[in-house]
Image (spheres, helix red, strand yellow):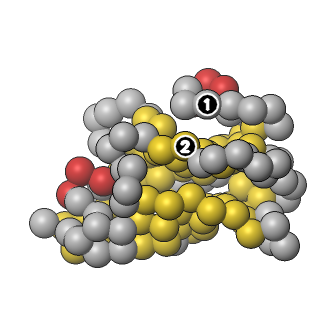
Amino acid sequence: VQLQASGGGLVQAGGSLRLSCAASRRTFRAWFRQASGKEREFVALISWSGGTPYYADSVKGRFTISKDSASNTVYLDMNNLKPEDTAIYYCAASYVRSWTSPSEYAYWGQGTLVTVSS
């Protein structure tokens, strides 16, 4: 599976961004992020076959993960961004149901940088 992430950029605190993750196939999909000097952490996940999306507590109520079946694309809408959301955001994919550990995902996009200024 090839993943192409895009949509990062610089935004002021309180602003919004939309990240996109295009894939060559429909897969279980998740977003992770990695801030400078920190470990990669789970952000959100979505199943292509149904079920409720799942979010990290730190982004719940601010971020929304969604999918477009026609283009095999998953989106991450990020609202009310905070400086602590600054990180490289990675799209990840798996052919089996996976959860919040990076080790569960076999396929990764190249990452897109999100910078939130205060």
**Closer to the camera in the image, 26 or 107:** 26
Q: Would you call the spot at circle 1 few (<14 residues within 10 Å), some (14-19), or many (20 or more)? A: some
Nearer to us in this view, 41 or 3: 41
| Location of mark 1 (residue) | 99
Counting from the top left corner in percent of width and height, residue 32 is at 50, 44
Q: Residue 106 at what x, y percent from top left?
A: 73, 33
Image quadrant holding the C terminus, namely: bottom left
Q: Say whether residue 96 is visible.
A: yes
- Please name the residue that numbered disc 2 is placed on: 54
Residue drawn 86% across the image and 55% down it: 25
Q: CA distance from mark 2 to mark 1?
A: 9 Å
Q: Indicate the position of residue 116 as horizontal and vertical percent values.
A: 26, 64
Say which label, 2 or 1, has the lower sequence index: 2
Which is in the foreground here, disc 2 or disc 1? 2
Reply above or below: 36 against 14: above
Could one spot residue 9 in this view of the protein? Answer: no
- Measuring from the top left, give residue 117's x and y in whole percent: 19, 67
Q: Give the residue type that dot 2 points to.
A: Tyr
Tell whether label 1 touches label 2 (CB within 8 Å).
yes
Q: Is residue 2 left or right of residue 37?
A: right
Camera-side residue: 57 or 94? 57
Q: Quadrant of residue 81?
A: bottom left
Q: Which quadrant of the structure image shows residue 115?
A: bottom left
Determine which of the numbered discs, if any, sits on residue 60 in the image: none
Which of the 4 quarters of the picture holds residue 100?
top right
Q: Amino acid at mark 1?
A: Trp
Give the residue displayed 75% in from the left and 32% down from the top. 97
Local secondary structure at mark 1: loop
In the image, is 113 to the left or to the right of 24? left
